[in-house]
Image (tube, rainbow, N blue to C red):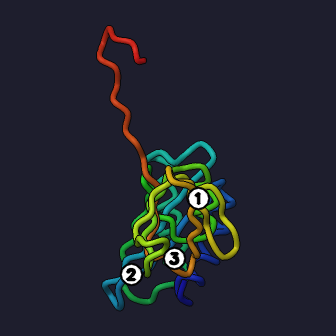
Amino acid sequence: MDDLEARLWDMIGPYLAAEGIELDDLEVRGVGGARLVRIALDAAGGMDVEALARASQGVSRLLDQADALPEAYTLEVGSPGLERELRRRAHFGKALGREVVVTTREAVAGSRTHRGLLDEVGDEAMTLRQSDGAQRIPFGQVVQARTVFRWEKAPKPGHKRG
């Protein structure tokens, strides 16, 4: 997280927390008048469209009043989604027990792509439970990680699952 992102996090996080909303992620892309400020929000009961719209308006006012970004910017507000990117250590903690896909910088146990249940999150590494055993992956090797959502087919009308 760079200085601008850290400053925005410190400004937006407490504002949203007072509204019962968690600032789950924040990313600033681009430079000058082409900046994109992307935030992901979460709440205990989830975030519906109306809650996202209210939060977007409030954060936009906050950023404008504080003149946090002197140049023009676009604010994009959403929720983490079903298949969410895992960028911060807290994201990995929330994903414990879920299926994840992790891409590493260099091969770990002969592969750069790993898929399994996130079994453990430590200070330096995570452990994935895979069909052939557990795989420890150091956080320093992670290039990209995301949760996996499995769609289940709905039963045909009149048929039972099983």
Identity of the amino acid at label 1? Ala
Q: Nearer the viewer, residue 68 or 135?
A: 135
C-alpha distance separating marks 1 and 3: 45 Å
Res 29 label: 2
Which residue is the site of mark 3?
Answer: 63
Query: Of circles 1 and 3, which is in front?
Result: 1
Res 101 label: none
* Residue displayed at 56% across by 71% down: 137
The answer to whether residue 147 is above or below residue 59 is above
Q: Which of 124 and 93 is in front in this view?
A: 124
Query: Of circles 3 and 2, which is in front?
Result: 2
Secondary structure found at label 1: strand
Q: Picture quarter containing residue 89?
A: bottom right
Q: Are marks 1 and 3 in contact (CB under 8 Å)?
A: no
Identity of the amino acid at label 3? Leu
The answer to whether residue 71 is above or below residue 36 is below
Which residue is the site of mark 1?
Answer: 134
Q: Do the residues labelled 1 and 2 touch (CB within 8 Å)?
A: no
Secondary structure found at label 3: helix
Q: Where is residue 53 in the image (x, y as percent from the top left)?
A: 45, 54
Q: Where is residue 46 in the image (x, y as percent from the top left)?
A: 55, 45
Lower sequence index among marks 1 and 3: 3
